[in-house]
Protein backbone atom coordinates (compact mmCIF):
# COMPACT_ATOMS: atom_id res chain seq x y z
CA UNK A 1 0.00 0.00 0.00
CA UNK A 2 1.70 3.18 -1.19
CA UNK A 3 1.79 6.46 0.71
CA UNK A 4 -1.13 8.69 -0.25
CA UNK A 5 0.19 12.08 0.84
CA UNK A 6 2.03 12.98 -2.37
CA UNK A 7 -0.54 11.62 -4.76
CA UNK A 8 -2.91 14.56 -4.92
CA UNK A 9 -0.43 16.99 -6.45
CA UNK A 10 -1.18 17.84 -10.04
CA UNK A 11 -4.70 16.41 -10.09
CA UNK A 12 -7.16 18.42 -12.13
CA UNK A 13 -10.94 18.37 -11.81
CA UNK A 14 -13.62 20.69 -13.17
CA UNK A 15 -15.86 22.74 -10.93
CA UNK A 16 -19.00 20.74 -11.65
CA UNK A 17 -17.35 17.36 -11.01
CA UNK A 18 -19.62 15.27 -8.79
CA UNK A 19 -18.05 14.34 -5.46
CA UNK A 20 -19.93 12.27 -2.98
CA UNK A 21 -21.04 8.90 -1.74
CA UNK A 22 -23.77 6.37 -2.31
CA UNK A 23 -26.32 4.49 -0.20
CA UNK A 24 -29.29 2.29 -1.07
CA UNK A 25 -32.72 2.23 0.54
CA UNK A 26 -32.83 -1.31 1.89
CA UNK A 27 -29.28 -1.22 3.21
CA UNK A 28 -29.76 1.81 5.47
CA UNK A 29 -33.40 2.81 5.89
CA UNK A 30 -34.63 0.23 8.36
CA UNK A 31 -38.25 -0.81 8.84
CA UNK A 32 -38.73 -2.14 5.34
CA UNK A 33 -41.00 -4.93 4.28
CA UNK A 34 -40.13 -6.44 0.92
CA UNK A 35 -39.12 -9.74 -0.68
CA UNK A 36 -35.67 -9.44 0.90
CA UNK A 37 -36.87 -8.96 4.50
CA UNK A 38 -39.04 -12.08 4.14
CA UNK A 39 -36.02 -14.06 2.97
CA UNK A 40 -33.81 -12.64 5.74
CA UNK A 41 -36.13 -14.05 8.39
CA UNK A 42 -36.30 -17.42 6.66
CA UNK A 43 -32.53 -17.79 6.36
CA UNK A 44 -30.93 -15.92 9.30
CA UNK A 45 -30.54 -18.94 11.56
CA UNK A 46 -28.96 -21.03 8.85
CA UNK A 47 -26.57 -18.28 7.79
CA UNK A 48 -25.42 -17.80 11.39
CA UNK A 49 -24.68 -21.50 11.74
CA UNK A 50 -22.77 -21.55 8.44
CA UNK A 51 -20.73 -18.44 9.26
CA UNK A 52 -17.48 -20.23 10.00
CA UNK A 53 -17.75 -22.24 6.80
CA UNK A 54 -18.37 -19.03 4.82
CA UNK A 55 -15.95 -16.62 6.49
CA UNK A 56 -13.60 -18.74 8.61
CA UNK A 57 -10.79 -18.35 6.02
CA UNK A 58 -10.81 -14.53 6.29
CA UNK A 59 -7.86 -12.85 8.00
CA UNK A 60 -10.07 -11.09 10.52
CA UNK A 61 -12.29 -14.05 11.32
CA UNK A 62 -11.81 -13.72 15.08
CA UNK A 63 -13.10 -10.13 14.93
CA UNK A 64 -15.94 -11.05 12.57
CA UNK A 65 -17.04 -14.17 14.44
CA UNK A 66 -19.07 -12.64 17.30
CA UNK A 67 -21.31 -10.81 14.81
CA UNK A 68 -21.36 -13.30 11.97
CA UNK A 69 -22.47 -16.19 14.18
CA UNK A 70 -25.56 -14.32 15.43
CA UNK A 71 -28.80 -14.64 13.43
CA UNK A 72 -29.60 -10.96 14.07
CA UNK A 73 -26.62 -10.05 11.86
CA UNK A 74 -28.63 -11.29 8.86
CA UNK A 75 -31.87 -9.41 9.55
CA UNK A 76 -31.94 -5.83 8.25
CA UNK A 77 -34.43 -4.69 10.94
CA UNK A 78 -33.81 -1.07 11.90
CA UNK A 79 -30.60 -1.01 9.80
CA UNK A 80 -28.99 2.46 10.19
CA UNK A 81 -32.43 4.01 10.78
CA UNK A 82 -31.66 6.37 7.93
CA UNK A 83 -35.38 6.62 7.15
CA UNK A 84 -35.75 8.71 10.32
CA UNK A 85 -32.25 10.12 10.61
CA UNK A 86 -31.66 11.34 7.08
CA UNK A 87 -31.35 15.02 8.02
CA UNK A 88 -28.41 14.30 10.31
CA UNK A 89 -26.82 12.07 7.68
CA UNK A 90 -27.18 14.80 5.06
CA UNK A 91 -25.52 17.25 7.46
CA UNK A 92 -22.55 14.90 7.57
CA UNK A 93 -22.49 14.74 3.75
CA UNK A 94 -22.44 18.52 3.66
CA UNK A 95 -19.68 18.68 6.25
CA UNK A 96 -17.65 16.38 4.02
CA UNK A 97 -18.07 18.88 1.14
CA UNK A 98 -20.13 16.55 -1.02
CA UNK A 99 -22.02 18.09 -3.90
CA UNK A 100 -23.89 14.87 -4.65
CA UNK A 101 -25.39 11.88 -2.88
CA UNK A 102 -26.67 8.78 -4.59
CA UNK A 103 -29.70 7.44 -2.77
CA UNK A 104 -33.01 5.96 -3.77
CA UNK A 105 -36.68 5.26 -3.48
CA UNK A 106 -38.00 2.01 -2.01
CA UNK A 107 -40.66 0.52 -4.27
CA UNK A 108 -42.13 -1.58 -1.44
CA UNK A 109 -42.91 1.59 0.52
CA UNK A 110 -44.43 3.41 -2.44
CA UNK A 111 -46.64 0.51 -3.55
CA UNK A 112 -47.00 -1.87 -0.60
CA UNK A 113 -50.05 -3.49 -2.16
CA UNK A 114 -50.55 -4.05 -5.85
CA UNK A 115 -51.89 -0.86 -7.42
CA UNK A 116 -52.22 0.93 -4.05
CA UNK A 117 -49.79 3.79 -3.85
CA UNK A 118 -48.91 5.37 -0.54
CA UNK A 119 -49.12 9.17 -0.72
CA UNK A 120 -47.44 9.57 2.67
CA UNK A 121 -44.38 7.69 1.45
CA UNK A 122 -44.01 9.70 -1.74
CA UNK A 123 -44.30 12.77 0.47
CA UNK A 124 -41.51 11.35 2.64
CA UNK A 125 -39.20 11.05 -0.38
CA UNK A 126 -40.19 14.51 -1.60
CA UNK A 127 -39.07 15.93 1.74
CA UNK A 128 -36.04 13.68 1.71
CA UNK A 129 -34.69 14.85 -1.65
CA UNK A 130 -35.66 18.45 -0.90
CA UNK A 131 -33.62 18.28 2.33
CA UNK A 132 -30.66 17.19 0.22
CA UNK A 133 -31.11 19.96 -2.34
CA UNK A 134 -31.51 22.52 0.44
CA UNK A 135 -27.99 21.63 1.50
CA UNK A 136 -26.67 22.23 -2.01
CA UNK A 137 -26.30 18.50 -2.65
CA UNK A 138 -27.57 17.12 -5.96
CA UNK A 139 -29.45 13.85 -5.56
CA UNK A 140 -28.76 10.94 -7.87
CA UNK A 141 -31.98 9.00 -7.52
CA UNK A 142 -31.93 5.22 -7.81
CA UNK A 143 -35.34 3.74 -8.58
CA UNK A 144 -34.51 0.10 -8.03
CA UNK A 145 -31.70 -1.39 -5.95
CA UNK A 146 -32.80 -5.06 -5.86
CA UNK A 147 -35.69 -4.94 -3.39
CA UNK A 148 -39.35 -4.98 -4.38
CA UNK A 149 -42.80 -5.43 -2.80
CA UNK A 150 -43.74 -8.94 -1.81
CA UNK A 151 -46.76 -8.98 -4.12
CA UNK A 152 -44.40 -8.42 -7.06
CA UNK A 153 -42.18 -11.26 -5.85
CA UNK A 154 -45.25 -13.54 -5.67
CA UNK A 155 -46.01 -12.74 -9.29
CA UNK A 156 -42.52 -13.93 -10.23
CA UNK A 157 -40.64 -10.62 -10.10
CA UNK A 158 -38.60 -9.95 -13.21
CA UNK A 159 -38.68 -13.55 -14.39
CA UNK A 160 -41.81 -12.76 -16.42
CA UNK A 161 -41.81 -10.33 -19.28
CA UNK A 162 -45.45 -9.49 -18.56
CA UNK A 163 -44.44 -8.21 -15.10
CA UNK A 164 -42.32 -5.38 -16.48
CA UNK A 165 -45.45 -3.22 -16.69
CA UNK A 166 -45.65 -3.11 -12.90
CA UNK A 167 -42.19 -1.63 -12.70
CA UNK A 168 -43.02 0.89 -15.42
CA UNK A 169 -46.18 1.85 -13.56
CA UNK A 170 -44.19 2.41 -10.34
CA UNK A 171 -41.68 4.55 -12.24
CA UNK A 172 -44.50 6.62 -13.82
CA UNK A 173 -46.08 7.12 -10.43
CA UNK A 174 -42.83 8.33 -8.90
CA UNK A 175 -42.12 10.66 -11.81
CA UNK A 176 -45.60 12.15 -11.70
CA UNK A 177 -45.92 12.49 -7.95
CA UNK A 178 -42.46 13.20 -6.56
CA UNK A 179 -42.65 16.80 -7.65
CA UNK A 180 -38.94 17.24 -7.82
CA UNK A 181 -37.28 17.79 -11.11
CA UNK A 182 -34.50 15.20 -11.05
CA UNK A 183 -31.09 15.93 -12.53
CA UNK A 184 -29.81 12.35 -12.40
CA UNK A 185 -31.82 9.14 -12.30
CA UNK A 186 -30.54 5.58 -12.11
CA UNK A 187 -33.23 3.13 -13.15
CA UNK A 188 -31.65 -0.16 -12.09
CA UNK A 189 -28.67 -1.09 -9.96
CA UNK A 190 -26.27 -3.79 -11.17
CA UNK A 191 -28.54 -5.97 -13.29
CA UNK A 192 -25.85 -8.58 -13.97
CA UNK A 193 -24.92 -9.01 -10.29
CA UNK A 194 -28.57 -9.30 -9.28
CA UNK A 195 -29.42 -11.93 -11.89
CA UNK A 196 -26.31 -13.99 -11.20
CA UNK A 197 -26.74 -14.00 -7.42
CA UNK A 198 -30.54 -14.37 -7.34
CA UNK A 199 -31.18 -16.70 -10.27
CA UNK A 200 -27.99 -18.60 -10.94
CA UNK A 201 -25.84 -18.86 -7.84
CA UNK A 202 -28.58 -19.38 -5.21
CA UNK A 203 -27.04 -16.71 -3.01
CA UNK A 204 -29.91 -14.20 -2.83
CA UNK A 205 -33.69 -14.41 -2.94
CA UNK A 206 -35.35 -16.32 -4.53
CA UNK A 207 -32.25 -18.57 -4.64
CA UNK A 208 -32.68 -19.62 -8.25
CA UNK A 209 -30.25 -22.01 -9.84
CA UNK A 210 -30.77 -21.76 -13.55
CA UNK A 211 -28.47 -20.11 -16.04
CA UNK A 212 -31.26 -19.97 -18.61
CA UNK A 213 -33.59 -18.21 -16.20
CA UNK A 214 -30.91 -15.71 -15.23
CA UNK A 215 -30.52 -14.82 -18.92
CA UNK A 216 -34.29 -14.23 -19.20
CA UNK A 217 -34.28 -12.02 -16.11
CA UNK A 218 -31.39 -10.03 -17.54
CA UNK A 219 -33.28 -9.53 -20.78
CA UNK A 220 -36.36 -8.38 -18.86
CA UNK A 221 -34.29 -5.94 -16.83
CA UNK A 222 -32.91 -4.48 -20.07
CA UNK A 223 -36.47 -3.98 -21.31
CA UNK A 224 -37.55 -2.58 -17.93
CA UNK A 225 -34.68 -0.09 -18.08
CA UNK A 226 -35.57 1.05 -21.60
CA UNK A 227 -39.23 1.54 -20.71
CA UNK A 228 -38.36 3.41 -17.53
CA UNK A 229 -35.91 5.55 -19.49
CA UNK A 230 -38.70 6.62 -21.88
CA UNK A 231 -41.11 7.38 -19.03
CA UNK A 232 -38.56 9.55 -17.22
CA UNK A 233 -37.40 11.40 -20.34
CA UNK A 234 -40.97 12.11 -21.40
CA UNK A 235 -41.70 13.83 -18.13
CA UNK A 236 -38.24 15.35 -17.58
CA UNK A 237 -36.42 15.63 -20.92
CA UNK A 238 -33.43 17.27 -19.28
CA UNK A 239 -32.89 14.58 -16.64
CA UNK A 240 -29.75 12.50 -17.14
CA UNK A 241 -30.84 8.88 -17.02
CA UNK A 242 -28.68 5.78 -16.82
CA UNK A 243 -28.12 2.62 -14.86
CA UNK A 244 -25.43 1.53 -12.44
CA UNK A 245 -23.49 -1.35 -13.94
CA UNK A 246 -20.93 -3.42 -12.08
CA UNK A 247 -17.87 -3.82 -14.30
CA UNK A 248 -14.65 -5.64 -13.48
CA UNK A 249 -11.45 -4.96 -15.37
CA UNK A 250 -10.12 -8.05 -17.15
CA UNK A 251 -6.50 -8.01 -18.25
CA UNK A 252 -3.97 -10.54 -19.48
CA UNK A 253 -1.22 -11.20 -16.94
CA UNK A 254 1.23 -12.40 -19.60
CA UNK A 255 1.78 -12.08 -23.32
CA UNK A 256 0.09 -15.27 -24.38
CA UNK A 257 -2.68 -15.13 -26.95
CA UNK A 258 -4.90 -17.32 -24.82
CA UNK A 259 -4.69 -14.96 -21.82
CA UNK A 260 -5.46 -11.96 -24.03
CA UNK A 261 -8.38 -13.71 -25.67
CA UNK A 262 -9.88 -14.90 -22.36
CA UNK A 263 -9.54 -11.39 -20.87
CA UNK A 264 -11.44 -10.02 -23.89
CA UNK A 265 -14.13 -12.64 -23.42
CA UNK A 266 -14.45 -11.73 -19.73
CA UNK A 267 -14.98 -8.08 -20.65
CA UNK A 268 -17.46 -8.97 -23.38
CA UNK A 269 -19.64 -11.18 -21.15
CA UNK A 270 -19.42 -9.36 -17.83
CA UNK A 271 -19.36 -5.77 -19.00
CA UNK A 272 -20.40 -5.20 -22.61
CA UNK A 273 -23.17 -7.79 -22.97
CA UNK A 274 -25.69 -5.82 -20.92
CA UNK A 275 -24.59 -2.33 -21.96
CA UNK A 276 -24.99 -3.32 -25.60
CA UNK A 277 -28.66 -4.08 -24.95
CA UNK A 278 -29.39 -0.65 -23.52
CA UNK A 279 -26.77 1.65 -25.02
CA UNK A 280 -29.28 3.78 -26.93
CA UNK A 281 -31.11 4.47 -23.69
CA UNK A 282 -28.32 5.85 -21.58
CA UNK A 283 -27.32 9.45 -21.08
CA UNK A 284 -24.40 8.35 -18.93
CA UNK A 285 -22.81 5.12 -17.94
CA UNK A 286 -22.96 4.52 -14.18
CA UNK A 287 -19.95 2.42 -13.31
CA UNK A 288 -19.75 0.45 -10.06
CA UNK A 289 -16.14 -0.62 -9.61
CA UNK A 290 -14.80 -3.15 -7.12
CA UNK A 291 -12.85 -5.82 -8.98
CA UNK A 292 -10.02 -6.42 -11.45
CA UNK A 293 -9.18 -9.85 -12.78
CA UNK A 294 -5.76 -10.84 -13.99
CA UNK A 295 -6.12 -13.62 -16.55
CA UNK A 296 -3.41 -16.22 -16.97
CA UNK A 297 -4.30 -18.78 -19.61
CA UNK A 298 -7.97 -19.56 -19.14
CA UNK A 299 -8.18 -18.64 -15.45
CA UNK A 300 -8.21 -15.62 -13.19
CA UNK A 301 -5.16 -15.39 -10.92
CA UNK A 302 -5.01 -12.36 -8.69
CA UNK A 303 -1.76 -12.73 -6.85
CA UNK A 304 0.05 -10.50 -4.38
CA UNK A 305 -2.63 -7.84 -3.89
CA UNK A 306 -3.98 -6.89 -0.51
CA UNK A 307 -7.51 -7.89 0.41
CA UNK A 308 -10.37 -6.11 2.13
CA UNK A 309 -12.34 -7.53 5.08
CA UNK A 310 -14.49 -9.62 2.74
CA UNK A 311 -11.39 -11.16 1.19
CA UNK A 312 -11.86 -9.17 -2.02
CA UNK A 313 -8.66 -8.54 -3.90
CA UNK A 314 -8.02 -4.78 -4.18
CA UNK A 315 -6.75 -3.17 -7.39
CA UNK A 316 -8.11 0.39 -7.44
CA UNK A 317 -5.52 1.55 -10.00
CA UNK A 318 -7.18 -0.65 -12.62
CA UNK A 319 -10.07 1.76 -12.71
CA UNK A 320 -8.03 3.85 -15.16
CA UNK A 321 -7.77 1.29 -17.98
CA UNK A 322 -11.35 0.16 -17.34
CA UNK A 323 -12.69 3.69 -17.79
CA UNK A 324 -10.54 4.03 -20.90
CA UNK A 325 -11.90 0.82 -22.36
CA UNK A 326 -15.54 1.70 -21.67
CA UNK A 327 -15.22 5.27 -22.89
CA UNK A 328 -13.58 4.20 -26.11
CA UNK A 329 -16.33 1.66 -26.68
CA UNK A 330 -19.41 3.72 -25.82
CA UNK A 331 -18.34 7.39 -25.89
CA UNK A 332 -20.79 8.14 -23.06
CA UNK A 333 -20.01 10.27 -20.03
CA UNK A 334 -19.09 8.02 -17.12
CA UNK A 335 -20.05 8.49 -13.48
CA UNK A 336 -18.41 6.21 -10.93
CA UNK A 337 -21.66 5.45 -9.12
CA UNK A 338 -20.02 3.10 -6.57
CA UNK A 339 -16.56 2.01 -5.52
CA UNK A 340 -15.30 1.18 -2.06
CA UNK A 341 -13.94 -1.27 0.49
CA UNK A 342 -15.15 -3.32 3.44
CA UNK A 343 -12.67 -2.04 6.00
CA UNK A 344 -13.79 -1.97 9.64
CA UNK A 345 -10.42 -0.69 10.89
CA UNK A 346 -10.25 2.04 8.21
CA UNK A 347 -6.82 0.85 7.14
CA UNK A 348 -7.31 0.81 3.37
CA UNK A 349 -10.12 3.28 2.62
CA UNK A 350 -7.97 6.40 2.28
CA UNK A 351 -5.54 4.57 0.01
CA UNK A 352 -8.43 3.16 -2.06
CA UNK A 353 -9.96 6.61 -2.54
CA UNK A 354 -6.60 8.23 -3.36
CA UNK A 355 -5.82 5.52 -5.91
CA UNK A 356 -9.28 5.75 -7.43
CA UNK A 357 -9.13 9.51 -7.82
CA UNK A 358 -5.68 9.27 -9.36
CA UNK A 359 -6.98 6.60 -11.76
CA UNK A 360 -9.96 8.76 -12.72
CA UNK A 361 -7.74 11.76 -13.30
CA UNK A 362 -5.45 9.65 -15.44
CA UNK A 363 -8.37 8.39 -17.50
CA UNK A 364 -9.59 11.97 -17.95
CA UNK A 365 -6.12 13.03 -19.07
CA UNK A 366 -6.28 10.16 -21.59
CA UNK A 367 -9.46 11.74 -22.98
CA UNK A 368 -12.32 10.04 -21.13
CA UNK A 369 -15.29 12.11 -20.03
CA UNK A 370 -15.80 11.30 -16.33
CA UNK A 371 -18.43 13.27 -14.45
CA UNK A 372 -18.13 12.09 -10.88
CA UNK A 373 -16.79 9.86 -8.13
CA UNK A 374 -19.46 8.52 -5.78
CA UNK A 375 -17.88 6.40 -3.08
CA UNK A 376 -19.62 3.33 -1.64
CA UNK A 377 -20.78 4.08 0.97
CA UNK A 378 -21.74 7.10 3.05
CA UNK A 379 -22.75 4.90 6.00
CA UNK A 380 -22.04 1.44 7.31
CA UNK A 381 -24.95 -0.63 6.08
CA UNK A 382 -26.65 -3.99 5.63
CA UNK A 383 -24.45 -5.89 3.19
CA UNK A 384 -27.10 -8.22 1.70
CA UNK A 385 -26.38 -11.92 2.38
CA UNK A 386 -23.42 -11.03 4.61
CA UNK A 387 -25.51 -8.81 6.87
CA UNK A 388 -24.07 -6.09 9.07
CA UNK A 389 -20.52 -7.20 9.81
CA UNK A 390 -18.81 -5.82 6.66
CA UNK A 391 -18.18 -2.10 7.12
CA UNK A 392 -18.21 -0.06 3.93
CA UNK A 393 -19.05 3.31 5.52
CA UNK A 394 -17.16 6.55 5.37
CA UNK A 395 -19.18 6.99 8.52
CA UNK A 396 -19.22 4.32 11.19
CA UNK A 397 -22.61 3.38 12.57
CA UNK A 398 -23.04 1.98 16.06
CA UNK A 399 -26.15 -0.13 15.46
CA UNK A 400 -27.02 -0.27 19.16
CA UNK A 401 -27.19 3.51 19.66
CA UNK A 402 -27.42 4.61 16.00
CA UNK A 403 -24.57 7.02 16.72
CA UNK A 404 -22.52 8.11 13.73
CA UNK A 405 -18.73 8.60 13.81
CA UNK A 406 -16.94 10.03 10.79
CA UNK A 407 -13.97 7.79 9.98
CA UNK A 408 -10.61 9.47 9.52
CA UNK A 409 -10.48 8.43 5.84
CA UNK A 410 -13.74 10.36 5.36
CA UNK A 411 -12.38 13.48 7.04
CA UNK A 412 -9.45 13.27 4.66
CA UNK A 413 -11.73 12.69 1.63
CA UNK A 414 -13.82 15.73 2.62
CA UNK A 415 -10.72 17.95 2.73
CA UNK A 416 -9.46 16.56 -0.53
CA UNK A 417 -12.75 17.39 -2.26
CA UNK A 418 -12.39 20.98 -1.13
CA UNK A 419 -8.85 21.09 -2.45
CA UNK A 420 -9.66 19.48 -5.79
CA UNK A 421 -12.81 21.43 -6.59
CA UNK A 422 -12.13 23.44 -9.70
CA UNK A 423 -8.47 22.65 -10.14
CA UNK A 424 -8.86 22.43 -13.92
C1 LIG B 1 -23.97 -3.03 -4.53
C2 LIG B 1 -24.11 -2.54 -3.12
C3 LIG B 1 -23.18 -3.35 -2.22
C4 LIG B 1 -21.77 -3.13 -2.67
C5 LIG B 1 -20.72 -3.86 -1.84
C6 LIG B 1 -22.55 -3.30 -4.96
O1 LIG B 1 -22.52 -4.43 -5.74
O2 LIG B 1 -24.63 -2.19 -5.42
O3 LIG B 1 -25.45 -2.65 -2.74
O4 LIG B 1 -23.35 -3.07 -0.88
O5 LIG B 1 -21.62 -3.58 -3.99
O6 LIG B 1 -20.88 -5.23 -1.95
Image (cartoon, rainbow, N blue to C red):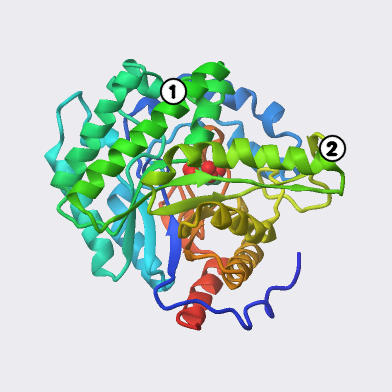
Q: CA distance from mark 2 to mark 1?
A: 39 Å
Q: Secondary structure at mark 2?
A: loop
Mark 1 surroundings within 10 Å by alpha-carbon count, few (fewer than 14), some (14 through 19), many (20 or more): some
Q: How many marks?
A: 2
Residue 167 visible, this orientation? yes
Label 2 vs label 1, nearer the camera: 2
Q: Residue at x 51, y 22 (%)?
A: 214
Picture quadrant of residue 256:
top right
Q: Secondary structure at mark 1?
A: helix
- Mark 1 C-beta closer than 8 Å to ligand 1: no
Picture quadrant of residue 117:
top left
Q: Residue at x 76, y 53 (%)?
A: 306
Q: Residue at x 65, y 47 (%)?
A: 291
Instruction: Where is residue 124? Give x, y as percent.
Output: 19, 48
Instruction: Where is residue 313? Give x, y as percent.
Output: 72, 48
**Which residue bears the numbered disc 1?**
39
Rendered-image quadrant of the N terminus: bottom right
Residue 296 visible, this orientation? no
- Residue 383 disc label: none
Instruction: Where is residue 307? Give x, y as percent.
Output: 73, 50
User: Which tag, 2 or 1, sits closer to the chain's start?
Assistant: 1
**Whether residue 234 is situated above or below residue 40 in the rendered picture:** below
Q: Is residue 370 left or right of residue 33?
A: right
**Whether residue 88 is situated above or below residue 7 in the rendered picture:** above
**Which residue bears the numbered disc 2?**
297
Amino acid sequence: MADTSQQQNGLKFPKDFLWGASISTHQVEGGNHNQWTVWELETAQQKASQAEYNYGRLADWSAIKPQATKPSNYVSGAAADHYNRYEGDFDIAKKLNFNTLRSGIEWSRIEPEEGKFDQAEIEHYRKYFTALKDRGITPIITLWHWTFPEWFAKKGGFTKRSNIRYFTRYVSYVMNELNISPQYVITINEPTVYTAMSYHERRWPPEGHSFVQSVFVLQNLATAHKKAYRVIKKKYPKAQVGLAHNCAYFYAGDNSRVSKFVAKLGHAFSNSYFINKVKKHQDFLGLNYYFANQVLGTKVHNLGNEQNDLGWDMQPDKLRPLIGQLFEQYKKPIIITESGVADAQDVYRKWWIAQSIKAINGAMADGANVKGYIHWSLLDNFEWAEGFWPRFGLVEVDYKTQKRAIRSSAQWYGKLIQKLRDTR
